[in-house]
Amino acid sequence: MTDSDPSRSARDDATIDLASFGFDETGDAWLDTFRDAQRADPMGRLGDYELLAEIGRGGQGVVYKARRASDDRIVAIKRLIGGKLAPADLRRRFEREMRVAASLDHPNITRAIDIDVIDGHPVIVMEWIDGQPLDVWGRPNGVRRPVADILRLFVDACDAVQHAHIRGVIHRDLKPSNILVTSTTTRDSVVHRPVVLDFGMARLLNPARDDTGATTAGAFLGTLAYAAPEQLSGGAQPADALADVYAMGVMLCETLTGRHPHVVSGSLGDTIRAIQEKTPERPSRVAPGLSRDLDAIVLKALSKTPEHRYQSIDALAADLRRHLAGDPVTARRPGTRYLAGKLIRRHPLAFGASALVFAIVTALASALYVANAREKAALRIARTTSDFLAETLAAAEPDRGGADVTLIEVLAQAGDRARRELADTPEAAAQVHLAIGKTYCALWRWRDAIPHLENAERLLRADPDRDDATFARALTALGRAYTSVKNPQAVSLQREALAIRRALFNEPDALIAESLKELAYALQQATDPPQWNAAEECYEAAIEMFRATLGPDHRETAACLHNYGWMRVRQRRYADSVELYHEAIEIFRRTHQRDDPFYVECLFGYTAQLSVLGRDEENLVVVNELIPRLRASHGEAEVGDLLWGRADILLRLGRFDEADDAFADAFRALREWGQAPALPGGADADTHCDDLLDRLADLPADRVRPVLAFIEEFAHSRVVMGRFDRAETIFDRLETAVSRLAPNAALILATIQEGRADIAIARGENALAEQRYRRALDLADRPGLAFDRKRAWLERQLAVCRIVSPAGADDLARLEIACAKLAEHDGADHRLTRETRSLIDELRLTLDTRPTDRRPAP
Amino acid sequence: MMSPDTTRASLLLRIRDPDDHLAWREFDGAYGELIVRYCRARGLQLMDAEDVRQLVMLNLSRSIPRFDYRPEVGRFRDYLRTIVRHAVARHAPRHGGAAIGLDTVVLETMASGVDDMMDAEWDRQWRRLHCRIALRTLRREGDPRHVDIFERLLGGASIQDAADAFGITEASVRKIKQRARERLQALVARQLRQEDGLD
């Protein structure tokens, strides 16, 4: 029987074939056949590259792992299937598209190393990414990672796709195997980075067009599961960026729920019908515990109609960020344009330094700066609320030519409307009240915020179908407002929010960390006495959890460090606070976020504590950075306090000429703030001082006291510089002005007396100094923290004064008492306390060694 | 994801529908690899082999729907081999690479009953294909522990090594090996019948 023998049946052929496998032979011939089948055939070379393995195969291309012989580098090589067979014009298009894709430069997009034609084959050589496909990373061993981790990763992936979109490159083949996640272990945590592969490949061949002959083959090798409905309709138009939005929605749904939004395991026709016609199930139904907001986000991304989807991948990322931040997401309501910019410009800046004169420098400067940042933060929050609030804001459009409208007025209107129109819809009412409350919070108007937040909390608590994640947000916001007005109920609210989040999410989780941070803040601010230990535990846990979930360099970590630092300030542990502020600042510096408004807030805290600790050299550097930033964002009038602070630092450093220049700068800012006309350029500090003293009566009444206070500070600088006569002259004029314009300014008067006493000491007129210190103490004999601190300092000065005129052990004892009082008010770390402590130590040595015959008679 | 219920027979029937993308995907996954390995063994570079694969699949998708499969005239594996050989021959000079109409040539050849030269390499690669398919089925359906033991033997371990590694007797290992042999033989036999349309 031969092969061509027609009598041989097919069944005979099958038998012969089976025998060729070696099954009928003795021994292991059959096993050798199977071993041979398992053996990997060498893939050969392509130019300088040794092909190691086929990594992926899609409808349009194949990817190989390869080693470059010249440097042993591992790379990925991609080529178009059938590239050599393609017509020349298609190949040119391919090469052009590859160059565009290769031009993408983003940390989350795989980088092209080379585009070449090797042995006639156009290829693109890419960096090798050692990572897991997104679906494997998202659910290791089938268990979902923390939701917040997943969302943050998707935000990064969306940023990468957006980067490509705005450069005209659509992916069109997004799927888990095209997003690899690398994991890098740092000292404190593991950082996960998504890398999007294969940009530009899918755009090349449109399955709907058969202009190459290869497209039919490509079509059946494509991936349907992540294709948007419009991609499957076979229309002539190629799918656009919204197809990428859809694909991202599918992957998000799969990662969160463990299931594809549609049934894709059946026939091709069934799969296509499901994608095009069937509404996907809500993710929270598949995976209980997911929030309604996430449902809305996923379902919006999966809208069958492109017009109903997020209109950009960036919009999807923005909603994910909002959800991570605990803010309302736009997916739950259609968006509305909002004229934020115009309202910001027209909102009168009601804040000034007048209310803050007697505060310490940092608080004064912080309030000035934050006043502007608050506006921006508040309006950002307002923009993301429901149509309801956005409509109210839009109705107050400044460009209608009406009177100035303030954001506060609009919020009040929105509140009235909510009470009238939403009485029958508690869920909507809760959302609107929460939004209004959070907007007030962003303006630091806690007492306005509280009624709205209480409404939101009450409505949500009464709703059996409430979304727990939203409820936790409402509790957190109300707790924060309560903390700010020192209502101790803040603690129980934050504890409840923390418990809810712990039930919803697995630790570590960034939202749990946020609750820990807020609870810490409540424990330190809203309880009396402050629960320092409990707050410290919460801060430590929050920081560790922020680092674990967001990485070591995240803004939230910096914010937590800042709050912790503030707690240390209140505890008067200044050295500790400085370290915490410094750590927060370094986060912004490392991540190049110096333009973040919160960076400036951290710098304020830092400079204040450096001042307290007397670390003047370091402080000068910080202040020199802070001043131009504040000047650029808020104008000259807002940097006055910093300029005074800078002058003060230079004074303490003994750099008097520079201090004088700094005082001149400070006076210029003070004039602008105080609404005094400017002097010709080049006027020195003394000229400014005298001119202002002449104009005091012309200044607005609420600016007089602060101006007097600053002039007093300037006068004191003359004392330090040894210009006693000049100082005396200014003190005389100040006393006259105070008695006429601000007769109740006892603190200023006490400080003027203190200054005169300092002059007396410097001149060696100790008895006169003692007299003046006592006069100052009398003037400062008033209730209030500022007066308490002033008295403590005056007593210290008095004690020193008496020792200088030499005295004995009793005087040293008085100085010890004064030092103790200083420590009680300012803390042991405060430079003034430490200087006093040092003085005591020196004097003790002196007293002990003094010969007894030199001691004065009692 | 391919349906585990797809049989070889139904696959060869399903690919008659060029729009059954899942079936074509499975077909390409199996037979495409055969084509590439054959071409590589015949001296083509990998990329050229991939081009041949693509070309063959493309032309198959056009010719299969109207192809009247008669095993007594020509078997599928021979039909496929002929297409591939012609594609290799046309592709090797690397001139242009325009699509070629293979279907007419092959059909005429089949109709005449002439099947020219034996091709040992094709047979070898074809056997390797069926071995891989059968092994995949065994791994999917077999007892996991027995599969592990068999894999150890497949990797070159002796009976004694496998027994030591798994803490069982050599007799047990031999028994497991024999069962695997029988199972693989049955699987391959079924695959061959289905390929030839006998099942």
Image (cartoon, coloured by chain):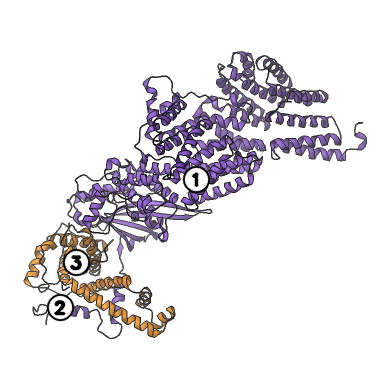
Q: Nearer the viewer, mark 3 or mark 1?
A: 3
The amino acid on which the numbered mark 2 sits, given as a three-letter code, is Arg
From the viewer's side, name the closer residue of A254 and A282.
A282
Task: Write down the colour of chain A.
Answer: purple
Numbered circle sitting on residue A502:
none
Amino acid marked by disc 3: Ser
Q: Residue A340 occupies which quadrant of the picture?
A: top left
Residue annotated with mark 3 = B10
The residue under label 1 is A554
Does B7 appear above or below A841?
below
Q: Secondary structure at mark 3?
A: helix
Residue receiving disc 2: A11
Q: Residues within 10 Å of mark 1 (few under 14, many from 20)?
A: some
Q: Which percent across, then down, holds residue A650? A: 65, 31
Q: Earlier in the sequence, mark 2 or mark 1?
A: 2
Task: Let me know if residue B142 appears in the view.
Answer: yes
Instruction: Report the side of A155 relative to B35 (left or right).
Output: right
